[in-house]
Amino acid sequence: MLDELERVLHDRKFGYSREGALLARESYGALATLVRPTSIEPTARDHDDDLVLGTAIASDADAIVTRDRDLLDLGTAFGIQIMRPAAFLARLEQG
């Protein structure tokens, strides 16, 4: 997941420099608890997203926060709610 974070941040959509993306990866890596993703049957339309789902399962996540349409279209998977950042922030504000 950290490799994916670095790759996506350096992608033209987010526009981080290679150094900025690496720094973000290292910063998140220092805060993260690493888990081995749970192996799942192909679930997401984009099968690369199955790694995200497997990681969320392995980490006992309550939610996946993303802008990825393929994941968002699932709504909920394996009991894990998949939501946009704004919806997640609203959920946090509600307590």
Image (cartoon, rainbow, N blue to C red):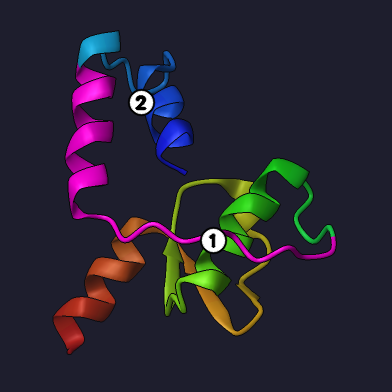
The percent position of residue 16, horizontal first and vertical second, equals 27, 17
Q: Nearer the viewer, residue 68 or 58?
A: 58
The range drawn in magenta is 20-41
Along the horizontal axis of the image, is 56 left or right of 23? right
The quarter holding residue 10 reads: top left
Q: Nearer the viewer, residue 82 or 5?
A: 5
Q: Is residue 50 above or below residue 92?
A: above
Q: Nearer the viewer, residue 58 or 49?
A: 58
* Marker disc for residue 9: 2
Q: In which quadrant of the rendered image does the C terminus lie?
A: bottom left
Circle 1 residues within 10 Å: few <14, some 14–19, many ≥20: many
Q: Nearer the viewer, residue 61 or 68?
A: 61
SS label for mark 1? helix
Instruction: Answer yes or no: is residue 72 visible.
Output: no
Along the horizontal axis of the image, is 88 left or right of 40? left
Residue occupying image coordinates x 66% and y 79%: 78
Q: Is residue 64 above or below residue 1?
A: below
Q: Which residue is mark 1?
A: 55
The percent position of residue 41, horizontal first and vertical second, equals 84, 64
